[in-house]
Amino acid sequence: MVLCGVVISIVPGLPVIALSPEIVFIIFLPPLLYHAAWHTSWSDFKQSIRPITFAAVGLVFFTTGLVAVFAHWLIDDMSWPLAFLLGAIVSPPDAVSATAITKGLGLNPRLIAILEGESLVNDASGLVAYKYALTAITAGNFVLWQAGLNFVLMSALGIGIGLAVGFIMYYIHKRFVCDDIIEVTLTLLTPFASYLLAEHFEGSGVLAVVTTGLFLAARSGTIFSHESRIMTNTIWDVLNNILNGLIFILIGLQLRQIIAGISNYSGNSLFIWGAVISIVVILVRFLWVIPATILPRIISKKIREKEQFDYRNMIIFGWSGMRGVVSMAAALALPLMLNKTEEFPLRNLIIYLVFCVILSTLVIQGLTLPWLIKKLKIERYSILAEEYNIRNVIVSETIAHIEDNFSLLNDELLHNIKSKYEVKFNRLQKTELPANFFGNGKLLGGEIFNDFTKIQIDLLNVERGKLESMHKFGSVNEEIFRKIEKELDLEETRLWMEMYEEN
């Protein structure tokens, strides 16, 4: 998407489309953060709260400060407030980028939980620094102790409002809503309600949205029907992809104008500035992660006993600080005018430098992360054995429930119901998993028997082909066609979910 934005910027004749800075955050930030929070495990988040907090607060402010120092030293026109503003924009790694880049790489779940949790919470601290740097530029004043106190108050208020909105929406979904379309519509409105309410009361809108998302995601199994869950997940995946693409299309459409706005600087200077700021953003993460990982282990015996240490995870964490759509949204949200007569200073240069950081971290770090994991010889973690055990417990408990509660049913009906779960249980028992599947020694691939599931999917395709043929020749009612088609789609979805595939 970043590269597409570059390509769009050089296509001649395309119009310059710029959203009002006041609404950039409102359009992009709430749904993107809500989607990321929805796919984050609260259990994993809670267990990793210490390293997440260190990274999401300490590392963000440390990055903001060091980037500001280098930017002020490097660029003559860059005042301290502007330098801190640039640092605040590029300081938080992006939740969407972290999820997208690390997906399918077989990293340890705890490391992924830390990366995703950090990327969710750090936007709050980054945007607080952004807000106060912006205030220092526009109003000309800044008091450090007031900023620190306000950060604590804004965070607490944002979390409180997020929990309140989450509880209200939980109650509405649980008690009053029974229509799938309304369920999905409410999920689309929820992040905006949480964000705007928190911002209205001067709390952290980011933390409010994240809190609401985590609260409702942990309870989604009890408040949504299976149909609304399928519909909601599908619509949110599409919306998330559209918003991510749209913001880079917008930057691409503005990039030509932004480059024109910094034409008074030489090409060499622009390249050096973009490269240096990007290198500082990448290296500062390593300067932080080493003491932040080692010092708690030295101080606390409990941490040493509880958490296994592997220096390779520190390297992966340091190399996973990709910036993305949140930094881009923050840059685009910079006001056009400082006051009614004066343009915002160095706005185009700041947006250009932010784009350089995003391009460098996503392309350089993102594309080389799989290679780095391979070079470090990190054993691929798979949740396949964990899934196997969970499925075994579920099926066994269900069979026991049938035997205990349905013994008075007609023998034939009881046999048909029980045989369905016995087939699943027998397939699980035939699944061969190596004894060292969790990574002790050389990892061997599990030999999984998917033949039964594949045959069922093939037969579903036969059913679907016959149904479509009847529909084509007008021998089936449209309403009946859509209903049977949906049944087949849901059944195929279920079967594909049962397939055993290593992540």
Image (cartoon, rainbow, N blue to C red):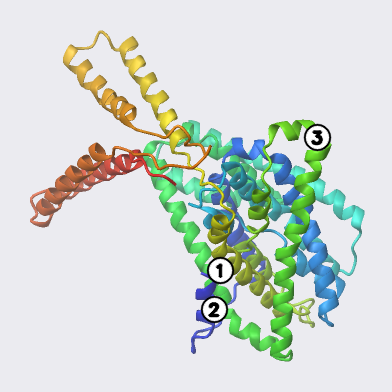
Which disc is residue 6 wearing?
A: 2
Residue at 18% across, 50% down: 478
Total number of numbered discs in the rendering? 3
Of the numbered discs 2 and 3, the one sitting upstream in the chain is 2
Which residue shows up at 67% across the image and 38% down it? Answer: 308
Tell me which label, 1 or 3, sits earlier in the chain. Answer: 1
Mark 2 and mark 1: Cα distance apart in space: 12 Å
Q: Residues within 10 Å of mark 2 (few under 14, many from 20)?
A: some
Quarter location, residue 49 = top right
Instruction: Mark yes or no: residue 203 visible.
Output: no
Q: Which of label 1 and label 3 is nearer to you?
A: 3
Kindly identify which residue carries mark 3.
Answer: 300
Between the C-alphas of marks 2 and 3, the distance is: 48 Å
In the picture, the disc for residue 247 is 1
Q: Residues within 10 Å of mark 3 (few under 14, many from 20)?
A: few
**Residue 259 % position (x, y):** 64, 85
